[in-house]
Image (spheres, grey):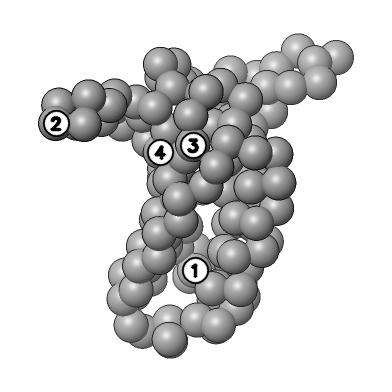
Amino acid sequence: MSPDEPWSFRLFIPRDPQSVGIVRATLRSILEAARLNCIVDTAELLVSELVTNAHRHADTDAFVSMDYAPKELCVSVWDAGPGLSVAAVEPDAEAERGRGLPLVDALADEWGVARHHDKGAGVSGKGVWFRLRPGAGRG
């Protein structure tokens, strides 16, 4: 793998608190192998926030996709939970939770939320995604 070649990875992750660490380590390994060290720390932080949200707010397993096209990484975390977060609201200063989407908003080059519905499987849910561009002030 190189920073000039496109690639994709997919992970199905169980609804288990240990999944966050597994996804972080996997993403770090992939980005380091692709020599994209300039975005490793940011991508690792953001994916852990999204996987944590999926774990907390959905009673289902999740799916993580990592897609790289030269000059852009897109990471999506999909779950079958009913909620659809659409805004990064600043948490109360005393709140122990609620900082995930504001972090994504502050650090990602782009981010968003998409609904999905698979009629054949009878599954609905959402995907929260972010994009990072290695050259965007990151080295």
**Residue occupying image coordinates x 46% and y 56%:** 11
Q: Is residue 104 visible?
A: no
How far separated are the C-alphas under marks 1 and 4? 23 Å
Foreground pick, 96 / 57: 57
First reached walking from the N terminus: tag 2 or tag 3:
3
Q: Is residue 125 visible?
A: yes
Asked whether the residues under the numbered discs 1 and 4 touch, taking CB atoms below 8 Å apart as contact, a structural biologist would say: no
**Residue highlighted by disc 1:** 134
Q: Nearer the viewer, mark 3 or mark 1?
A: 3
Foreground pick, 24 / 94: 24
**Residue occupying image coordinates x 29% and y 24%:** 124
How far separated are the C-alphas under marks 2 and 3? 18 Å
Total label count? 4
User: Could you tell me which secondary element the residue under label 4 belongs to?
Assistant: strand
Locate residue 47, reporting x and y percent: 57, 48
Q: Nearer the viewer, mark 2 or mark 1?
A: 2
- Which numbered circle lies on residue 52? none
First reached walking from the N terminus: tag 3 or tag 1:
3
